[in-house]
Image: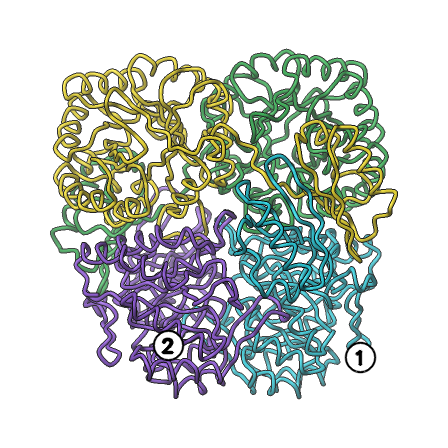
Chain colours: A yellow, B green, C cyan, D purple
Amino acid sequence: MIIVMKPTSTEADVKNIVNKLEECGLKAHLSKGESITIIGVVGDKHIFLEKNPQLMPGVEKLVHVSESYKLSNKKFHPEPTVIDIDGVKIGGDNFVIMAGPCAVESEQQMFETAEAVLAGGAQILRGGAYKPRTSPYSFQGLEVDGLKYMANARKKYGLKIISEVTSNAAIEAAKGYVDIIQIGARNMQNFELLKTAGKTNIPVMLKRGISATIDEWLNAAEYIMSEGNQNVILCERGIRTYETSTRNTLDLSAIPVVKSKSHLPIIVDPSHATGVREYVAPLAKAAIAAGADGLMIEVHPNPAIALSDGPQSLNPEDFKKLCGELRPFIELMGRKF
Amino acid sequence: MIIVMKPTSTEADVKNIVNKLEECGLKAHLSKGESITIIGVVGDKHIFLEKNPQLMPGVEKLVHVSESYKLSNKKFHPEPTVIDIDGVKIGGDNFVIMAGPCAVESEQQMFETAEAVLAGGAQILRGGAYKPRTSPYSFQGLEVDGLKYMANARKKYGLKIISEVTSNAAIEAAKGYVDIIQIGARNMQNFELLKTAGKTNIPVMLKRGISATIDEWLNAAEYIMSEGNQNVILCERGIRTYETSTRNTLDLSAIPVVKSKSHLPIIVDPSHATGVREYVAPLAKAAIAAGADGLMIEVHPNPAIALSDGPQSLNPEDFKKLCGELRPFIELMGRKF
Amino acid sequence: MIIVMKPTSTEADVKNIVNKLEECGLKAHLSKGESITIIGVVGDKHIFLEKNPQLMPGVEKLVHVSESYKLSNKKFHPEPTVIDIDGVKIGGDNFVIMAGPCAVESEQQMFETAEAVLAGGAQILRGGAYKPRTSPYSFQGLEVDGLKYMANARKKYGLKIISEVTSNAAIEAAKGYVDIIQIGARNMQNFELLKTAGKTNIPVMLKRGISATIDEWLNAAEYIMSEGNQNVILCERGIRTYETSTRNTLDLSAIPVVKSKSHLPIIVDPSHATGVREYVAPLAKAAIAAGADGLMIEVHPNPAIALSDGPQSLNPEDFKKLCGELRPFIELMGRKF
Amino acid sequence: MIIVMKPTSTEADVKNIVNKLEECGLKAHLSKGESITIIGVVGDKHIFLEKNPQLMPGVEKLVHVSESYKLSNKKFHPEPTVIDIDGVKIGGDNFVIMAGPCAVESEQQMFETAEAVLAGGAQILRGGAYKPRTSPYSFQGLEVDGLKYMANARKKYGLKIISEVTSNAAIEAAKGYVDIIQIGARNMQNFELLKTAGKTNIPVMLKRGISATIDEWLNAAEYIMSEGNQNVILCERGIRTYETSTRNTLDLSAIPVVKSKSHLPIIVDPSHATGVREYVAPLAKAAIAAGADGLMIEVHPNPAIALSDGPQSLNPEDFKKLCGELRPFIELMGRKF
C-alpha cells in the first residue's frame, strides 16, 4: 500500500503516520519530493486500515497495490483449477458446452432439449427452475417441479445438469437434483446466497454482475471459496454499457484478464449477452478463440413458444449446426471436447 | 405495443400476425408504407406476448409503449404517497433527514450519534447491522446486537430508526426493532428479499441498484408492492459510470424522472454516492433543490475510527453545521422539516 | 510516481530501475516487503517516462500521484478565476445565465429571444451558427449569417453573446462577432481546435466530452491555456451512461470535484443534459445549490417551430418564470446576479 | 415512425396531428386503445419532423423505426463493400492486417517495422504522424516528416500505408503520401474533418468514438460518404465502460451488429482497446472468429523505447509469432490472407 500525502502536509503529519504504522508493526518507507511525500507500506495492513488512515491529517489518498481476494487469486494457486463432475471436466485443456432453455417448462420440453444437447455433443443441460425476472408479473419458474424434470432428463440421457438458485431455499431444493448450482448476475453480490452456496460441496457457476468489475467478481467468488467450496466456475454474460444494439456488451477481454489473475475456469454466455439469435454463433466462436473454457447457449425445442428468452434461443437443428461449426475452433485451441 | 415488420416481410406474414392477434382477442391496426409496415396493438397483450411475436416470420421488432409496473405508477395513483411513521411523514410536502453511521459498532456509538442526529434536527437514525461488503474479509456487521443498540437509542432519544436487511433471516430479526427496512443497492434485484419485505407491513426504503435503470427500479418496487406492502421509499445513491473522481455518479435527474413516473417518495444519499466528505454538503443542497423528499447522510461520532466508510462520514459538529445550511434550502422548497 | 514491482521481480530488476532513475537525475525510495517491492520517485519524471518504465523487467505498474494539467490546476492557482467580459463577470461570487436557442434561425428569432433573455435578467445570449449534428441530413446551421444576426441582437439589446465553433474557419469567422467561443462536447478532444482557440484572446467555454473524465476535461482546458488564453469556462452538460430516461446523465458531482481541483469557473447546461423541458427547472436549481457559477438554458421564441432541440427549449414566458424561481436560490448561495 | 399519444390526450389532439400529417402529404394510421392511441406514419417525414411533433398537444413520444443513415446502410446496398487499394483488398472474403507503431519516430524505425510487418505477412504499415494526446505536454508527432518516413518505407518494402489525420491541414499533407487516411476515436464526430475526408478519393478508416453507439458511428460514416467518398472502413477500438482492468472494453459484438446493418468492412484494434500486450493475441483471434475483416496491431522495433503506447506494442519477433498463430483462424473463417 502507498500513502500519498497532500502537498500541504507537514513533517508532523508524516511523523504521525509513521508512528501509527509502527504501532501496528509495519515499516514505513518515505519518499520525499519537492511537493509530495509518499509513504510505502508493506506487510499485513489489516489493523492499520481499521484506523481509517484516509482521515489522518495530511493524507491525500491510499493506493492499494495488492488484491483483496486470496483463494481465487492465481498468485497463490498458479495452476488452473479443473473441476471434475463425475467425468465431465471444466477448466485446464477441457472444453464444455452447457445448453438448454432459459426456463424449464415441462418434462417433455427437457427431454427434447436433452436430445438436442446430446446431438450437438454438449455435456451439460441447463434449465431455469427459479427465474429472477425484472417484472413481478412475468413467469417466475416451475421451482421444484422444474428441478425434477431436469433430473429425469439427466437420468434418461446421461447429461450433467445446471440450474440457477435465487434463495437459500432454492439451494436446499437444488441439492438433491443438480450437478452445478448457478448464481445469476443479479445475485452476484447477494452475499448471503454466496455463503450458503459456499457451504455446499456442489460446484457453483457464478455469473458476473451486470456492472461488476472483474475485481468485484473475484471477490464474490472469494465469498463462496472462503466457506470451503473451491469449485467455482466464472461466467461472463455481458456488462451494462450505453450501447443498445445488443442487450448487454459481451466483455471478451474478461477472459484473458481472468486468466491472468485467477486459476478459476471461465465460461461465456453469448445468448444472454446479446439477446439476439443471429449474434450467438459469431460470439461463441470468438469466445473460444479468446480462450474461454466453455460456453452456455440457450436452446429450446421450439423457441417460438418459449416462456422466456425465445428470441435468443436456438432450435435443436440450429444448435447442432452451430456445434459443428464450433468444433474446429475448439480443436484449433487444443481443447478436448 | 407496436410491431414493426421487416422490409422483406410479405403480406402473408402480416396476415399471420393479424390472425394471431385476433385469436388473442386483440385488434390490429395496420400502417402500410412503401418499405415498412407497422402494426399497432392495443389491449391486454399478456397472452399474445407468450407466443413470442419477435420470432414470427417477418417481424423486425416490438416497441412497448406502456410501462410494466402498475402499483408504483403515477398514472394509476396520481397523488404522491405520504408514509406516516408514527408522526414522521415521508413524501408530499414533508422533508426528512436520516443520519447515522454506515455500521453499528456499539451502543455507546449509537447513543452519541443519536444525540448528533437530534441536534441537527433530523428525524431518523440510520445504522447498518448487516453489512454487505465486497470482500468476505471485511467487517460484516454486528447483526442482532446492532439492531438492539439501535432500538435502545430509539427509545432513549425518540428517533425513528432504519437499518439494512440482506436476507430473509435479517428481515425476521429486524421486524421487532426497526421502523424502516432498507434494501441495499446490491440486493435491488434480489427478488426473494423483495417479496419477503413485501409481506411485512414495515415501510421499505429501496436503494437503486448500482446500474439499475429507473424502469428496473420501479419494477423492483413493484415486487414489494405486489405482495401487499405499499409503503415503499426510493433512494438514489449514485450509479456506476466510467468517472472515477467520485465513487459513483449521483444521478439527481432521477428525482424529476421518478416524480414524473411514480407517486413514491425519493430520498438521496450523497455520502455513499460520492465517497468523499467534502462533496456531501453541495450535493445535499442540490438534492433538496431538485425536489428530493429527504436525505440520508453518514454521521459518526468519530469518523477516524469508523469500522466502515469513515472517509465519507461527517462528525457530529459538521453534521449540525450542515443541517443549519440545508434548512433555508428546505424552506425555499416549501417543505416541512 | 510510484513503481510497483511484480512479486516475481529480482533484486537485479530493482537495481536496474534505480540506476535508470539516477541516470535521469531522480532519486529512488525503496519499500521492500515480503512479496512486493515499491519504488517511490519524486522530481521531474519527464525524461524517465520516455524510457517506457512499464516495460522494464519486473515492473507491474506505475501509479501517478500528481495531475498532468498545470495551468488549470488549483494547486498552482488557488484563487478562483474571474473572467470579466466588459463588465459581465463569470466565476468567483458572480452568477451568470446564458440563454437562447440551440440554432440561430433568423434575425427576428434572435431579437425575440434577446428580449426574453433580458426579461429574465440573464446576461448572455446563446445561439448556434455552426451546428454539429449526428446525421449529415439534419440542419447544419446558418454559419456567418447566424453570427451576424447574433451580433445585431447584441448591439440592439446590450447582451453579451456566445456561439459554438466547430472548425478553425469558424473561429476565424466568430472572432469579429462573439464575446465567448463555445467548444462543444464532440470537439472536446479536437486538439487542433483547442489550440486555435488558445491562440485567440476570446474567452472559451469548453463543454465536457460526452464520456470525458474530469481529468481529461481539465487536460483539454490545458490545451487552450498552454497556448496563452487563460480565460476558460467549463460547462457540464451530461455524460453518457446506460440510463435512457434522460438524454444524458447530468453529473452535478462534477461541480464540487472541479472546484476542488481547478480554479476555472463551471457552468451547467440542464437543457442538453436532460433533453426534456420539464426537467430543466429542478436541475437548474440543483446546479445552483451545488455551487455552479452559472447556467446555460435553451430558450426559443416558439419551441414548436425550432429547427433543433425544440422539445427541451423553454418559451419566453416559461424562461422568465424560471428565472424568478431561480433568483432566491442564487441569493441563498451568496451570488451576485 | 410511430407517434404515441398521452393517456390524457383528447380526440382533438389526435385530429390536429392527423391534419398536420396530411398537410405534409403523409397518411396517418390510427390505433386507438382503451388508454393509449398510437399513430403510425409512413413516407418521407422530413417536412413534418421540422414542425417538432414532440411538442404538439397530447404527444407522449415519437418512435423512429428506420435508420437515418442511407449510404452506409445494408438495406440499400446488400453486397459487402470491397475496397481495392492497388491490389490489397479490404472487405468481402479478404483479410487484412495493419501493423506498426503508435507514433512514427524516425525513418530507421519505420524501415525496421516494415520488415517486421512483411515478415508477419501483413499488408499495411501503420504509423502516427499527427498524434492526438490527452495532455498538451505529451509528444505530438513528427507531422509531415513522419509521413515522409512512412512513404519511403512504402516505396522500399512495397507495403500500403495508413496514418491518422487530425485536421484539414493534415489531410492536405497526407494526400500525397498515404493509402488510407485514419480518423481517430476522438474525432469521430469532428464533422468538419469527416466532410473534408469525404471530399478526397482516399479510403478512410473511421475509428469508433470512445462512447459512440453503432448508430452514431454509421452516421459518422455517412458524413464521409455523403460527400462522395464511398471507401470507408470501420474500426472497433474499444468503448468506455466502468471496467478498469483494460484501457477500454473491446466490443466484439459490434462486428456481427455492423455486418447486419451495413455493407462496410470492419477492422478491430485489440492493441488500443486493451492497452496490455498480453491481451492482444487472444483478442486478435477472437476478432477473427467473430468475423472481422482485418486487424490493426501495434508493432514497434523496440517497444521499450517507443515514444507512445510502448506497453501495448509487440516487438517484431512476437508479431511474427502472432501472425503465425492467427493464420489458421483466418483460414478457418475462409478468408484470403
- Element marked by disc 1: loop
In the displayed structure, does residue B54 sit left or right of residue C143? Answer: left
In the displayed structure, does residue B186 sit left or right of residue B336? Answer: left
x, y percent for residue A140:
34, 25
**Where is D24 relative to B172, above or below?**
below
What is the spatial separation of the Cα atoms under label 2 and label 1, in whole angstroms? 41 Å
Q: Nearer the viewer, residue B42 or B182?
A: B182
Give the chain of mark 2.
Answer: D
- Element marked by disc 2: helix
**Where is D94 relative to B152, above or below?**
below
Amino acid marked by disc 1: Asp
In which image quadrant can residue C192 be found? bottom right
In the displayed structure, does residue C11 sit left or right of residue B314? Answer: left
**Where is A318 relative to B308, above or below?**
below
x, y percent for residue B72:
50, 33
Q: Are marks 2 and 1 in contact (CB under 8 Å)?
A: no
In which image quadrant can residue A326 be found? top left
Structural crowding at the residue carrying mark 1, measured as other residues with C-alpha within 10 Å and reported as few (<14), some (14–19) or many (≥20):
few
Give the chain of mark 1.
Answer: C
Identity of the residue drawn at 56% across and 79% down = C129
Q: Is residue D58 visible?
A: no
Q: Nearer the viewer, residue C106 or A231?
A: A231
Q: Nearer the viewer, residue D23 or D225?
A: D225
What residue is shown with label 1? C86
What residue is shown with label 2? D224
Q: Nearer the viewer, residue B134 or D56?
A: B134
Amino acid marked by disc 2: Ile
**Where is A122 relative to B332, above or below?**
above
x, y percent for residue D269:
38, 61
Closer to the eye: label 2 or 1: 2
